[in-house]
Image: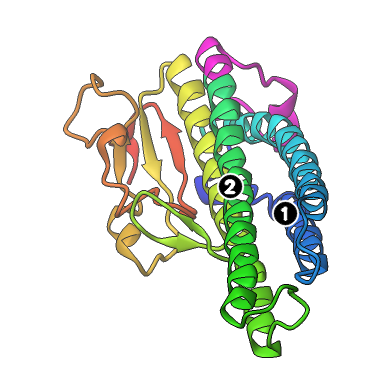
Amino acid sequence: MPKMNEIPIPTYKYDVEILLGYYKEALRKINTELSRLDLTKLDRANITVMQKEIADIILELDDKAKAWVATMLPKAAEDGIVYTLLSLGLAETVAEAQKIVVFNRLNREFVKTAIADMQDDLLQVTQNVERKVRKAVRQVTAEAMRSNLTQGLNTIDAIRPDIMRGLKARLGDALNTGIIDAAGRRWKPEVYVDMVTRTKLAHTQRESAINEAIGRNAFYGMISSHGAKDACRNWEGKIVKLTADAPGDYPYYGVLPNREIFHPNCKHVISPVRRPERIN
């Protein structure tokens, strides 16, 4: 039976970079479309064509993101099950554990919900981008026309260079206005996607490990240790209950304060155990 600190914990760094690449490329394409908007020819046809191009870019991005989630979350869940099999001594190696992985009823339902939730989270990112871009285009075109009217001009060709630069910058900034989360923090789209993705993968891995453990009558777990410097350090090596009605004077995993442990980007995992009193 491998020791807990010897069990490998996947980080999905390469896979996350692939997803981030989709978002970075889409944002680059949208920025290119915005930079091509000719503020001297602001007719409805030009704006409609540009908006259609941006909508197509976002649709393609959404399709790629959905496919990525549908592939990666089941993989993270499988890794969580493997981790439990190794922790409980039901397999000696990762390869051996992978051969006996089966999603129990808890994990089948959990993975379905996790995929839908994450796809919805990522969809909200692209919807936010599209909404911000549309708003910026409306505001910039209105200000461009207003600038000419203020100068008594009938064409937009005479917009002062400094005003033109400012309007162009406003269009570009529409991609960086960010996502505001429930705590009021502002994120750039690609940074938010990175945070959400890593957090969801870790959560999926952890929850599937717990579901597998409970299905095998292991109702306790030990929080991993890696020398954390933040509030997580207070929980390292602690024994927790995986289900609220398990006997013993241990805190229940489901009510741990996420400001202190298992917060966004948290790297800690839970190693399931059957007999917590035997843990030194």
Per the rendered image, the range of residues in magenta is 88-109
Q: Residue furthest left?
A: 249
Q: Badge 2 local density, few (<14 within 10 Å), some, or many (20+)?
A: many
Residue 83 position in % (x across, y down): 58, 35
Q: Residue furthest top?
A: 105
Residue bearing mark 1? 23
Indicate left or right for 127 with 71 as reference. Answer: left
Q: Which sits in the foreground, 249 or 77? A: 77
Which residue is painted at 31% across and 33% down in the image?
254
Residue 81 position in % (x across, y down): 59, 28
Query: Which tag, 2 or 1, sits closer to the chain's start?
Result: 1
Indicate left or right for 80 with 22 as reference. Answer: left
Residue 112 shows in the view: yes
Q: Is label 2 in contact with label 1 (beta carbons under 8 Å)?
A: yes
Give the mark count: 2
Indicate left or right for 57 with 103 as reference. Answer: right
Q: Is residue 108 magenta?
A: yes
Q: Badge 1 local density, few (<14 within 10 Å), some, or many (20+)?
A: many
Q: In terms of secondary structure, where does tag 1 sit? A: helix
Q: In terms of secondary structure, where does tag 2 sit? A: helix
Which residue is painted at 30% across and 37% down in the image?
240
Q: Is residue 140 magenta?
A: no
Residue 138 position in % (x across, y down): 61, 57
Amino acid tagged 1: Tyr
